[in-house]
Amino acid sequence: MSRTLRHFLFILFIGCCSPVILAQNQKSKPDAISRFNTDADEFSGYDSFGYCYLIKNNVFRKVKGNETFEYKSVSLGNITKVDLQNPLKIVLFYEDFNSVVLLDNQLNKITEINFSQNNIPIVVTFIGMSTQNQLWVYNSLNQQIGLFDYLKNEYKTVSTPLTETIKYYQTDFNTFYWIDKKNNWFSCDIFGKTTALGKVPDFDKIEIMNTHQYIFSKGGFLFFKDISDTNSNTISEIEILEKTFDKFCYKDQILSIFTAKEITNYKIVTP
């Protein structure tokens, strides 16, 4: 099936089935600003200093030009999640062992936390860096969002129990975002205030940009949505050169597309 036909069928499907209907088939063509070959199993993203983070054979790598740093744990299994919000305290989550490792900017281990050994029972499903030496934690034992102080070894719950299964989550220092299995989008701040942000279209992958904008992929195509747009039904397609891709990341107006062979960076200008 040609890409054009697949595109037509996908637009038709979204128009008929999605909770957000395409009012216009808007398109944007971002400029490709850089591209380089890579040999990695997974692309974790960039930091604000321009370093690229990759995983190959469960070895975590930080790369920029000829400069490379590596970290590997021989005892904690596979890396489940990488959080790069603070490049001086990088978070590696090992879900199988209910553990987190914090790394410095040269990928030296700062500390290792085994939540199974904590005084308060915590089984971590989702995690991310927060403020003031704290980590966002979703505790599957009580289905609540909490904050864990890794210096004081203290944990506090901030949300009420979630009633639906989390399909996707993302964090920044002050906010825990999640989308449930019904595609409802929520946020919870560090004080426990929970806000319903609306409903998102069905997606294969998604990245939240802020409280009103996100990029998502479906059927091999990329789309941008701004819920603050006065025309709330409008979704814009982002036209990229890649026919297929494994992952995309957005940071500081740069959209990075990861394939099996290379990473391409596009400049994205949003309202």
Image: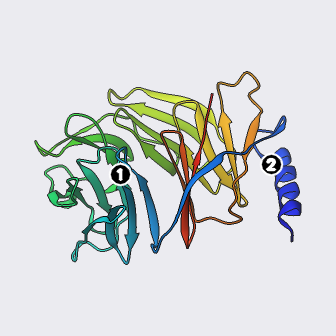
SS of the residue at dot 2? helix
SS of the residue at dot 1? strand
Q: Residue 153 at what x, y percent from top left? A: 13, 46
For the residues marked 1 and 2, what is the alpha-carbon distance in whole angstroms? 32 Å
Task: Identify the amino acid type marked 1.
Answer: Asp
Residue drawn at 56 percent across, 73 percent down = 260
Q: Quadrant of the C terminus?
A: top right
Mark 2 Cα shell of 10 Å, populated few (<14), some (14-19), many (≥20): some
Residue drawn at 26 percent across, 68 percent down = 70
Q: In this rendering, does residue 264 appear at all?
A: yes
Residue beneath disc 2: 14
Considering every residue shown, the one lying at the far left of the view is 152
- In this orientation, which residue lies closer to the viewer: 271 or 160? 271
Residue drawn at 55 percent across, 73 percent down = 261
Residue drawn at 37 percent across, 35 percent down = 159
Task: Residue 83: give its label.
Answer: 1
Task: Identify the amino acid type marked 2.
Answer: Ile
